[in-house]
Image (cartoon, coloured by chain):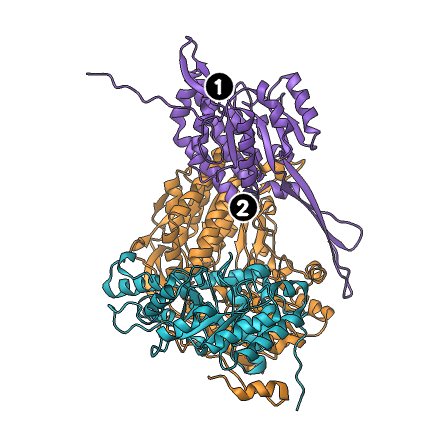
Chain colours: A purple, B cyan, C orange
Amino acid sequence: MATRIEIQKTYKIYIGGQFPRTESGRYYPLKNKKGDVMANICLSSRKDFRNAEVAARGAQSGWGSRAAFNRAQILYRIAEMLEGRKEQFISELVLQGSTVAAAKQEVETSIDRMVYYSGWCDKFQAIYSSVNPVASSHFNFSVPEPTGVVAIIADEATSLLGLVTAIAPVIAGGNTCIVLASETKPLCAVTFAEVLNSSDLPGGVVNILTGSSSELHEHFSSHMDVNAVVYYRNNKAEIKTIKENASLNVKRVFVYNKINIATEKAESPYFIFDTQEIKTTWHPIENIGTSKAGY
Amino acid sequence: MYKRQLPDFRITPTIDQVGIEERVARFTTRSIKKESKMQGMKMILSMIDLTTLEGKDTEGKVKQMCYKAAHLHDVIPGLPTVAAVCVYPSMVKTAKDALKGTGVKVASVSTAFPSGQSTHEIKIADTTFAVDNGADEIDMVISRGEFLKGNYNFVFDEIVAIKEACGKARLKVIFETGELSTLDNVRKASDIAMYAGADFIKTSTGKISPAATMPVTLVMLEAIRDYYYATGRMVGMKPAGGISTSKLALQYLIMVNETLGADWLSNEWFRFGASSLANDVLMQIAKQTTGVYQSSDYFSKD
Amino acid sequence: MKENKNTKKAFYSGKDLPEVKLKFNSAWDLAPAPEDSKHVSIKKQYDLFINGEFVKPNSKKYFATYNPATDEKISEVADADEKDVDKAVKAARAAFGKWSKLSGKERGKYIYRIARLMQERAREFAVIETMDGGKPIRESRDIDVPLAANHFFYYAGWADKLEYAFPNRNPKPLGVAGQIIPWNFPLLMAAWKIAPALAAGNTVVLKPAETTPLTALKLAELIRDSGLPKGVVNIITGAGKTGAAIVNHPDINKIAFTGSTNVGKWIQKSIAGTDKKCTLELGGKAANIIFEDAPLDQAVEGIINGIFFNQGHVCCAGSRLFVQESVADVVIRKLKDRMETLRVGDPMDKNTDIGAINSKQQLLKIQEYINIGKNEGGEIYQPSCSLPKKGNFCKPTIFLNVSQSHRIVQEEIFGPVLAIQTFRTIEEVIEKANNIPYGLSAGVWTDKGSKIFNLTSKLKAGVIWANTYNKFDPTSPFGGYKESGFGREGGLHGLGAYLQF
């Protein structure tokens, strides 16, 4: 019996709900332990980042103004799609050097984490909003609002979990994002993009690039139309540059380099809170009648 | 005996947009079936103002459209004609000749349609020209710039002047609701136009988006109702642009039926400004009678 | 009516205007548009859902449930007696150990499953809800079932997040919750009760109302299909005696009740001296207040939504209308016109606005109140619509020229009957709105923001709708002041009732 030749997968990047190749045409090979080339990975350029930002900005007002319940349903659907593709992710993790047991654990934690944040979409507002009992006759309330477009440099050590950990709280809060996947373990990032694409998530809400942080961190942090940067790695020089560049347009910067992604400490509504702005509104309360009106 | 005064147009009844949209949602859940659907379809056909308002219009195009107006789909017997055709003033004579003896009216746009950005004299002349050529109805546009500046008296006076120039022709006043942006403004424009003598109030020119929408139409129908109770005078309503499916047109009719009642369910008081709606309605009628879904290949496009 | 040239002159000359009237329902009759019910399956007989299976009632007795629109019997359900209640509570207690020790994450996943399954079977639930209870299919399809599914979806997400809802506390479930629900929103009330209880780690014994047991039993089937561990949710049918047995059972930790104020008071009394926790959601007689600067047409729609939606079988119904005197005539004229376009009839028809009254008993009660209103001197108005000959139906009804002292203004009718009063000043209307033993809800209609907040902060009601009415959301807490009960359902505030700290 003749052996069947497999169709090898082309790994592209994910921008605006589409799967283009990097406009630079560059790539880097991903090798397994034996030194064989498993795949050619797009080496994304600053122009890819620029295009992704345009897509993210275009999608943000729509995504941010959807009902929280709607976002919750979409994040849950992402979890459903992830669960359905469990085996594919496990085999990709194994290809990239994981054991089967560890891979299963990582995928299951990722799915559960997605469900976790789906549950927060319509609840974090209750925790972080307030009606403020001001002394004057005003109805005064504070509510969180998404900060806008967030540039994320995801965890280097994991292929899937770091991605989910970074993305879920940001989009649960109504932001859109551009994410740089792990350089050494990029395979799951692209497959994850396929999952997002089949989950009713509007194009542009999440954009995923593969490539090198040493090249791209500069652009992630200097773009004048990005509102916040989130960094999950440990390179002190990169962190310094990011913080310096952020000052150009007063970006909010969050460096999560001390978190153990694998534990439950890595999931919390405070990660949603980080990429929210707080808006406080005042409105007079007129006082007609005997008892005093007020909150 | 008491003296009645024109209302102060600076003070408009307030409209709650969310409330309007919720009421509209109730209309869209009405289910129209069988005989009531057929009855609705025929009503819609009889209420259409078949429209061609393009820079590239010619006598030939207008003649073909006029034939379609009077002969929608001769294969099915017992169909009504449309209510009117709507054309530019330069085409009124052609349309009038083509429609002789059919009962289909000729409506003409005027007052520097669609922008309305011109002088008073030109707008009067535009109207007079159309009327002299035989137009039965005039569709004018209000000066949106003046309206948004708060110059309500200007808007009012302009409508009164055009109404006078119309003579026997019935006047439809177009608000271009897409430019007015709020439902409160739509209500205000409605009141101004009706008190100034409009015979019909109309949503849009069809040249910009959004054109007619159900919320805007509901606000105008409610304005007509309040005016009717206040003065005893009926005013017609015409949503124009964006109504291309019979399902949507039926929902508009439901809205008229439940807001103004039976008296407005005729083409004397309600029109659809549409061009491709007619064929969709014909396909629905054919489906009702034959039981099978239709293809647009079987219905003339003129 | 052709345009009358004289009226145009009349306008400017000042002569009196002719009386004008709009004609509804005469030009275009809508053909019947019945919802397809052939795909729906209802068993001839249902048993009790205890410990994950359907078991026969101890007494072997069943009672019928009818379609109030047709008076036809739809099915039979079991009559649970004290022994059955005991069995259910034991099952719930046995399941509680494992269920409460499950991680919040895993508990949440079960509840998510229930939500998703309900979304998949939505149409079937909607049809059965309409057949069993009489509410229009459009309401069950567009409101009841989606809200119920969403309620499960919302609370599923809280299961592993409880520590964030209660700062500085260590929340733990209470144990076994006994839950008794009414017949006006059968499936939705089941969702309001079960979802938060499960999310907090409790197990449940739930009794649906005796006239509307079917959707709760379909929910039991769905729960069984979801793989929820046995005994976590038990659904038993029965009437007042079954409910009393649940309330009095010694091994229940918490009672949650939605229903009439009288029964609520009896429950509060019955559990006195025990450790049982309790939440009550009882009756109401809400004030719906319209100021002269309100968006009037939308306010009228709010009145309709407030009292005629769901045939007025709503605890938070806006059953007392207060109209500022300066716009009373206009509002009442608009209200009457709008009432003419309401369609009363077959609940399975997609065009029906007002369906069947839930039972003959309730219809008689409503008719009695209508007579009381007439005898008390209220001016009654009903539109000209016709009612179906079979089944339990009532026309939407308004009473004009009534006051706070009339019985129909003080007592809850639970039907499509609205009492209308006028007011002149804000102080007056606030005082009158609060001048009842109830305090569940209220409506305020005005264009002025500061006036809204003046009223909302002074009205003694648990839910206040400003420029809207009868809006519900899983994230929005619902519950009453005073004799309308205590405790909140929905939102973060809905969790506390099912936890101990």
**Residue at position x 41%, y 22% in the image:** A90
**Distance Cα–Cα, label 2 vs label 1:** 33 Å
> Between residues C391 and B184, which one lies in front from this camera angle?
B184
Q: Determine the residue positioned at 59% across, 48% down.
A: C274
Circle 1 Cα neighbour tier, 10 Å, few/some/many (<14 / 14–19 / ≥20)? many
Residue A45's tag is none
Q: How crowded is mark 2: few (under 14 residues within 10 Å), some or many (20 or more)?
A: few
Q: What element carries label 2?
A: loop
Residue B5: quarter of image: bottom right
Residue indicated by mark 1: A185
Mark 2 residue type: Arg
Q: In which quarter of the image is residue C292?
A: bottom right
Name the spot of residue C456 as percent of width and height, x first.
68, 59
Q: Which chain carries label 2?
A: A
The answer to whether any part of residue C410 appears in the image is no
Badge 1 amino acid: Lys
Question: Height in image: C248 above or below B260?
Answer: above
Residue annotated with mark 2: A66
Location of the C terminus of chain C by quadrant is top right
Report how many numbered discs are placed on residues in the image. Answer: 2
Image quadrant where residue B253 sits: bottom left
Upstream in sequence: badge 2 or badge 1 = 2
Location of residue A161 in the rendering, given as x and y in whole percent from the top left corner: 51, 25
